[in-house]
Image: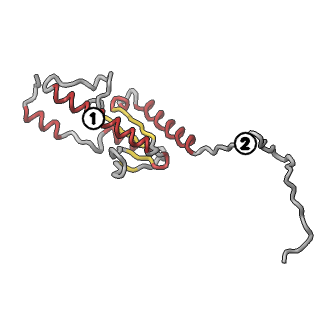
């Protein structure tokens, strides 16, 4: 049974905000300090991702472990009261998250999810370094120029003569 009264629980739940949360602020400050520029809650993208990095075609979702059902996490525990309601609510959130990420992927966006527990002091530095590494990897992969040659066409080496010859004429153009 819940140790708080219905009114107390209502006030607690009403005080929980969905924007500018502490985990969001940690990630945003890190990204900005390391030269990444982003938009917040882009209204034209499905699911209004928490952070959108257009240069990297990447959306970052910063999820609370409880609200988004982080399996195996100590912060994801279904309350003992009103269990059916919470199970349905969290299941809907998980399904919506998957649908939104699939939609973004179809649109050509990379999606990343950072869990609240990964931003706790013990794991924070490792998580943020991994985020930075992944963003740089995405950028390099998306901006690599690839060249393709026909099997018969052999690429020329530097300073190698080609079959195409250019003739210099002594005639002046008219």
Does any portion of residue 26 appear in the rendered image? no
At mark 2, the secondary structure is loop
Residue that sits furthest to the front in the current view: 152
Does residue 123 lie above or below 62 as drawn? above
Disc 1/disc 2 C-alpha distance (Å): 49 Å
Q: Position of residue 54 (x, y in %)?
A: 46, 49
**In front of the other: 115 or 122:** 115
Quadrant position of residue 105: top left
Instruction: Find residue 159 and report its horizontal and vertical position in percent.
Output: 84, 47
Q: Residue at x 10, y 22 (%)?
A: 1
Q: Are marks 1 and 2 in contact (CB under 8 Å)?
A: no
Residue at left offset 55%, top offset 43%: 142
Query: What x and y, as percent, mark residue 15?
Result: 18, 40
Towards the viewer: 13 or 126: 13
How crowded pointer 1 is (Cα within 10 Å; few <14, some 14-19, many 20+) is rated as some
Q: Quadrant of residue 170?
A: bottom right
Q: Position of residue 67 (x, y in %)?
A: 26, 33
* For marks 1 and 2 on the same chain, the one whose residue lies earlier in the sequence: 1
Task: Name the residue beneath numbered marker 1.
Answer: 93
Residue underneath mark 2:
150
Mark 2: few/some/many CA within 10 Å (<14, 14-19, 20+): few
Find numbered disc 1 in the image and state the secondary structure of the residue it sits on. Answer: helix
């Amino acid at each position: 049974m819940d140790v708080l009264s219905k009114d107390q629980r209502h006030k607690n739940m009403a005080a929980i905000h969905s924007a500018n949360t502490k985990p969001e602020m940690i990630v945003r400050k890190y990204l900005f300090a390391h030269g990444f520029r982003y938009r917040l809650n882009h209204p034209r993208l499905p699911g209004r991702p928490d952070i959108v990095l257009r240069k990297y075609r990447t959306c970052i979702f910063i999820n609370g472990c409880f609200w988004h059902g982080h399996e195996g996490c100590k912060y994801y525990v279904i309350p003992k009261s009103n269990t059916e309601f919470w199970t349905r609510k969290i299941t809907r959130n998980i399904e919506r998250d998957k649908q939104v990420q699939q939609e973004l992927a179809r649109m050509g966006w990379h999606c990343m999810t950072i869990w609240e527990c990964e931003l706790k002091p013990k794991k924070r530095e490792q998580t943020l370094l991994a985020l930075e590494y992944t963003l740089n990897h995405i950028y390099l992969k998306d901006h690599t120029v690839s060249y393709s040659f026909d099997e018969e066409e052999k690429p020329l080496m530097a300073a190698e003569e080609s079959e195409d010859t250019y003739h210099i004429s002594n005639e002046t153009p008219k």
